[in-house]
Image (cartoon, rainbow, N blue to C red):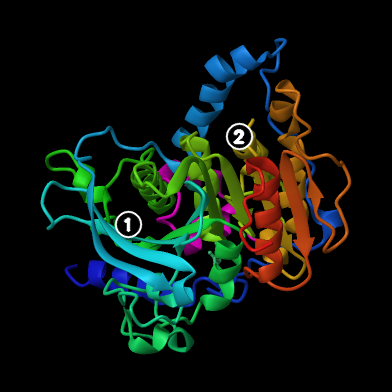
Amino acid sequence: MKYILPLLVLLAMSLQNCAETPKEDSPPSEWKPNYDESLVPEYTLPAVLSPASDETVESWEKKRRPEILALFKEHVFGHLPEAKADSLWWETLKEDKEALGGKAIRREVQCYFTPDKNGPSMQLMIYEPTVKTGPVPAFLALNFFGNHSIHPDTNITLSKQWMMNREEMGVVDHKATENSRGKRSSRWPIEMIIDRGYALATIYYGDIDPDFDDGFQNGIQPLFYTEGQERPTDNAWGSIGAWSWGLSKAMDVLQNMEGINGEQVAVFGHSRLGKTSLWAGALDERFALVISNNSGCGGAALSRRAFGETVERINTNFPHWFNGNFKKYNAKEGNLPVDQHQLLALIAPRPLYVASAEEDQWADPKGEFLSALHANPAYHLYDLPGLPTAEMPKVNEPVVGTIGYHIRTGKHNVTDYDWEQYLSFADLHFGATSIAD
Ligand code: GTR
């Protein structure tokens, strides 16, 4: 008996090792993903607006929106704990005024969640343009392999946290090595972001909750357990909830930072972290703009289409991401009281960008597009265009309204092309701030 728990942990960790790449070939099972449009089940989506009434902005904000938010908490991502144990404070550990050859100021800010330094904490790294006329807008994003993976600068502190094993990423025995510096820089065009007049703030997601299923013994969840409690209840938060909570804490910090315009912070995330940025954006209305990059199942894609990754598959491979209740909908998507277009509707009236990739069928690009489209009623309430097309655009032809959407050529990834669209979208909604022209 005493070996069962460690074995389960090992099994979860080994599953995790091959995470971050689509799971199509993983665990032996009869199950095969559906990639055939003609086999998508017939479905009816739950309504965004109150079914029986003439929705107004007021009734949406006071009644319908909170109703939908509560359903996502109860059935999908889990409720967040009450504010107990929430004593956020922070200190700047490093500041480099000559980052990127003098173009940027880089800071490492340690954010503590307990009054002393022994509890969990996260390291927020911020790049801010050196030349600016006032506080600048910012992108806030979690990263997969540590802050040091986003740029080769050896002054960036190497993360000491548990990390998913990935040899080509320089992670050995679940620890980052010197080799992992800058290994993810292709996904983070920092110079381009700085040249366009934006700051970039990022956190290693494992600082908040390491991404493996250990029954929620590490990460921030235990901080909130009541006496004798050993794991979250079935309707309480999983890892995505915890990561989103961390983004909100980072927002508390950014709002107190002189060089940053706290009214113009965009939250961005890729894949599981795209699911997270959407949930963070829904929960915390201080995020002025929300970006989902290839977020797929449990993110922007409609669950009822069951195309590519399904609710059952995601709950089986990653039982710790969503809450316990979400598992009731394994292979029963039609019973879900919500679908993901309603998650996107919770972002309204704030600008939202959803991006897909042509070769990322696992994430169901069409389902991501349809979800954005069906979020429109919430935007229309505010007389905003939402997504201004009902037809899925061709590859590399972005459509931009209050909701933006593109499907680009290529794989499940974050590319310069994606960032160029996000920067232009932010320019459009925040007012251009470029210092490079
Ligand atoms: C996959 C998972 C996707 C996506 C991806 C990632 O294995 O099936 O839902 O989140 O991981 O986060 O890279």
276 and 234: which is toward the camera: 276
Q: Is residue 110 above or below residue 162?
A: above
Q: Is residue 328 visible?
A: no
291 and 232: which is toward the camera: 291
Question: Residue 215 location, x and y as percent?
Answer: 29, 57
Residue that carries the numbered disc 2 in the rendered image? 338
User: Among all residues in the image, which is located at the extreme top?
Assistant: 53
Residue that carries the numbered disc 1 in the rendered image? 208
Q: Secondary structure at mark 1?
A: loop
Determine the CA span between mark 2 and mark 1.
Answer: 27 Å
Question: Residue 61 location, x and y as percent?
Answer: 56, 19
In the rendered structure, which amino acid carries the disc numbered 1?
Answer: Ile
- The N terminus is located in which quarter? bottom left
- Left or right, residue 5 beside residue 255: left
Q: Earlier in the sequence, mark 2 or mark 1?
A: 1
Q: Residue at x 64, y 48 (%)?
A: 426
Start and end of the magenta stretch? 308-330
Which picture quadrant has residue 186? bottom right
Q: Is residue 326 magenta?
A: yes
In the rendered structure, which amino acid carries the disc numbered 2?
Answer: Val
Q: Nearer the viewer, mark 2 or mark 1?
A: 1
Question: Residue 161 location, x and y as percent?
Answer: 28, 71
Q: Is mark 1 within 8 Å of ligand 1?
A: no
Q: Is residue 238 magenta?
A: no
